[in-house]
Amino acid sequence: MTSAPETVLWTMLTGVDAARDHIRSAAVESGFRAASFDEDCINIEVPFSLRKRRRAARLTATVWPSARGAGVAWTADPGALNHEYLAHIEETLPEGVMYYHGLKDAALRAGLSLGGRTELRAVVRALARDETVRAIGKGHLNETAGYIVLTTRRLLVIEASGLGSRTLLDAPHGSIEALSLGKRITGETLRVALPPGPIVISRLGHGEGHGIVKSYREEKKDRARFVPSSVGHRSAPDPEIHDSEVTCD
């Protein structure tokens, strides 16, 4: 039984026609060929190059209207989708045409440099279409460096190793029993209480863990506004944020 082809989804902040033009121009500028172009699909041929150690490939971009502008689904024929080729195209696109789910703004608030679009894509590819990043930091889960990403749905730890990054932790908000912030000489720490047992994320930069905990509390309050309280039940006040420790039950 053959598996379904891998698909990478983009969201572009332009109309469909402009999105097609941007993709075609970026592909050509990257040294590829726009082999065919119709109303819905762009077929990109990546020529073999011995000098660049590049294998020949064919990519297909299917473009459709979306709420934010244009959606793009990338597939490869035949074989696996080469993320390096897509990264070349994405890096060549004009600034401001790609939607990154609030990731750039979250990194700016945290004072965190994510580098180029390759690093952005490593995080964004793990997100659902309607998922938004609330806060981000960079730390270690065990001894593996990763991006700690709080979204409107989940707390993620995504390996900081480029395009082949693994998702090391995927904890929906409802599975988090408590979230605690601590400080050490090596940086801030997050203790995440989950049903299988707690995990500790260490070596976050100054203020990064605090931002994640604060955003988690705000997100939790927002969700609670839409959940009717039980009759006679009175919730305890939220704990305050302290420099040494924060607990969100």
Image (cartoon, rainbow, N blue to C red):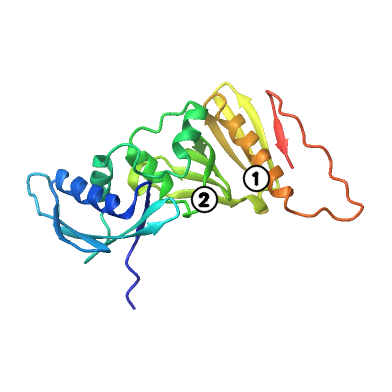
Residue 151 falls in which quadrant of the image? top right
Q: Which mark is in front, 2 or 1?
A: 2
Direction from residue 45 to residue 86 in the image, left or right: right
Judge whether residue 176 can be spotted in this image. yes
In the rendered structure, the answer to whether residue 72 lies left or right of residue 101 reads left
Q: Which mark is residue 131?
A: 2
Percent coordinates x, y for residue 173 in the rendering:
63, 50
Q: Residue at x 55, y 23 (%)?
A: 206
* Vertical relation: 106 (above or below) 129: above
The residue that appears at 48% across and 34% down in the rendered structure is 105
Circle 1 Cα neighbour tier, 10 Å, few/some/many (<14 / 14–19 / ≥20): few
Task: From the top left corner, tell me how far across and down residue 143 is, in percent.
Answer: 48, 38
Q: Looking at the picture, does residue 1 appear above or below residue 71?
A: below
Q: Residue furthest top?
A: 185
Disc nearer the start of the sequence (2/1): 2
Q: Residue at x 33, y 63 (%)?
A: 6
Q: Residue at x 68, y 45 (%)?
A: 222
Task: Give the residue pinned by disc 1.
Answer: 198
Find numbered disc 2 in the image and state the secondary structure of the residue it sits on. loop
Going by the numbered disc 1, the residue's amino acid type is: Pro
Nearer to us in this view, 215 or 195:
215
Q: Residue furthest left?
A: 50
Question: What amino acid type is highlighted by mark number 2?
Answer: Glu
In the picture as drawn, the residue positioned furthest to the right comes out as: 232
Q: Give the total number of marks visible in the rendering.
A: 2
Q: Position of residue 68 (x, y in %)?
A: 43, 50
